[in-house]
Image (tube, helix red, strand yellow):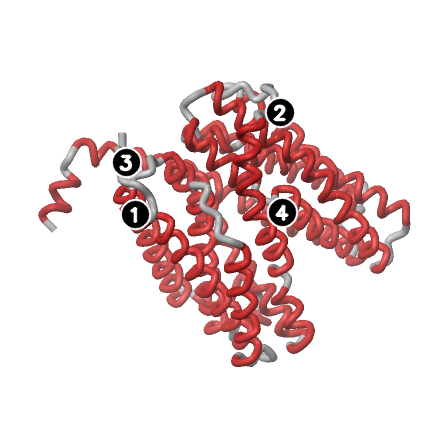
Amino acid sequence: MKAFVKRLNDPTAQKKLLEWGRLVTITGSAQLLIQAIGLVSGILIIRLLSPQEYALYTLANTMLGAMVVLADGGISAGVMSEGGKVWADKEKSGLVISTGLDLRKKFAAGSLLLALPVLIYLLQLHGSNWLISALIILALIPSFFTSLSNSLLEILPKLSQHIVPLQKIQVTTNLSRLVLACIALIIFPWAFIAILAAGLPQLWSARQLIKLSGNYANISDKPDPVIRKKILSIVKRTLPSAVYYCFLGQITVWLISIFGTTSSIASVGALGRIAMLLTIFTVLFNTLVIPRFARLPANKSLLLHRFLQIQGGLLLLSILMIAFFYLFSAQALWILGPGYSNLNNELLLTIAGGCLNLISAVSFSLSTSRGWTINPLYSISVSMLSIVCGIVFIDVSALKGILLFNIFISLMHALIFLIYAFVKINHCKYESAN
């Protein structure tokens, strides 16, 4: 205790504490604002679109998410890993970003060829004609390509920890999306208009991020074949898992559809809206913690110390979140409406599963930020075995069973990435931390 008090009285420690407090406050406030804007936008779109149009909108956005995951395939992890090594060198950083952007263009073409026929089929299956399908696909293009480029252009500001300009761009983009959607959908309440209203502000965002990234690197440089090879080595190990987990995200819906009831589907969807609050912490870690971990030298004791600190913070955050919703579950369920007022235990299970997903996602990002990618054969095999065991031993026909199944799968994923990270840290050399 004395050592802790002494450390707090240290001017250097106080300076770091104030810096972290400022960064967390800025980033957290911006993300709260972004989440609030997103919630208002979602309600607005639901209310202004007819059920048929909203169904098409949902299909398009679901496929958009899959397309972005497939087009990334681990490129962003590779760019973060290589960028973390040279982030202070403007010339080398520019080569990393330009190489990543070049790879993204090629992967984007492949993603479109694979995903668009599936999207067209689903749209046609749910009542869309060829004209509307074409308009929806055209409306998706701005969101698709800007999502791919923006995620790479954000890496250098994150590595340099210049968060405020980045947050200003994100908040302005989301506010523009809300205003544009409100004006456009009142006049033209169609799905492709809602998609286009979300995508157009991202074009402005992309231009602003290009200007911002220009402060840290020359991103117009030609791709570097050596860097491309290093990024692709990470992509080769990451892409199979990305494809697998892209489809794994739908497994809960499939299980509920096959074994559960309609009310269970509604309850899981409603509780999931509350669990989305954890997205704020995911963004905080991705913005503030992951880039700093990527920048650390290959020093075993330093990496282990930082990794344990991060995991301790995640554990404390999870305990606080579960305790909060235990104490205020009635108030949280009131937001969802009277139809969900008796789901107190289910709410806690949902939050527990969300916390495990947060630990799993952060652990995975910590590893990939260092260029450590687990062999997909191991991760997918363990995941598939976990799914089979969960289906066999857990009653997934009941709501609680489905939520326990989610917790079990999330726990297995968290253990996989935690153990792998510890193994990779243990293999690091004892190099100078300078």
What's the distance in space between the residues labelled 4 and 3, CA to CA?
A: 35 Å
Q: Amino acid at mark 1?
A: Leu
Q: Residue 69 — which label?
A: 4
Vertical comparison of 113 with 380: above or below:
above
Looking at this view, is 140 or 225 the one in front?
Answer: 225
Q: Position of residue 336 (x, y in %)?
A: 56, 63
Label 2: which residue? 207
Q: Position of residue 376 (x, y in %)?
A: 54, 55
In the picture of the structure, the residue carrying the numbered disc 3 is 431
Residue at figure coordinates x 46%, y 37% from the top left: 81
Identify the residue at horizontal 34%, vertical 47% (top origin): 427
Distance of label 1 from label 2 (alpha carbons): 39 Å
Element marked by disc 2: helix
Q: Which residue position is annotated with label 1?
A: 304
Q: Which kind of residue does numbered mark 4 sit on?
A: Val
Quarter where residue 17 is shown = top left
For badge 3, the amino acid type reads: Glu
Q: Residue furthest right?
A: 130
